[in-house]
Image (spheres, rainbow, N blue to C red):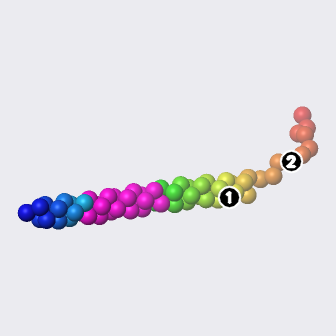
Amino acid sequence: MLGDGFAKMEQKKMDMAREVEAMRMDMEMKRTEMILESQQRIVEAFANALSEKKKKPKKMTSSPEY
């Protein structure tokens, strides 16, 4: 009887450990996805800034005549 109770308790501990590990891995995956998304946004913003800079015509250095 005591052995059965101990075995059930150990099984519950192992089940909890598996569940906690699955949650940890899920959270780690979400964290990694968030990092990748933010890095992608940074790259896109940088690329857009460079392309906008190339599109703008160069300003003339001489002053306009009145």
Please state the horizontal and vertical placement of residue 51, each as a whole percent of the image: 68, 58
> Quadrant location of the N terminus?
bottom left
The residue sitting at 56% across, 58% down in the picture is: 39
Q: Nearer the viewer, residue 44 or 19?
A: 19
**Residue 59 in the image: above or below residue 28:** above
Distance of label 1 from label 2 (alpha carbons): 20 Å
Q: Which residue is mark 2?
A: 60
In this rendering, the count of numbered labels is 2
Residue furthest out toward the top: 66
Check disc 1 and give the amino acid type. Answer: Ser
Q: Which residue is mark 1?
A: 51
Q: Residues within 10 Å of mark 1 (few under 14, many from 20)?
A: few
> Quadrant location of the C terminus?
top right
Check disc 2 and give the amino acid type. Answer: Met
Sequence-wise, the earlier of marks 1 and 2 is 1
Residues in magenta? 14-32
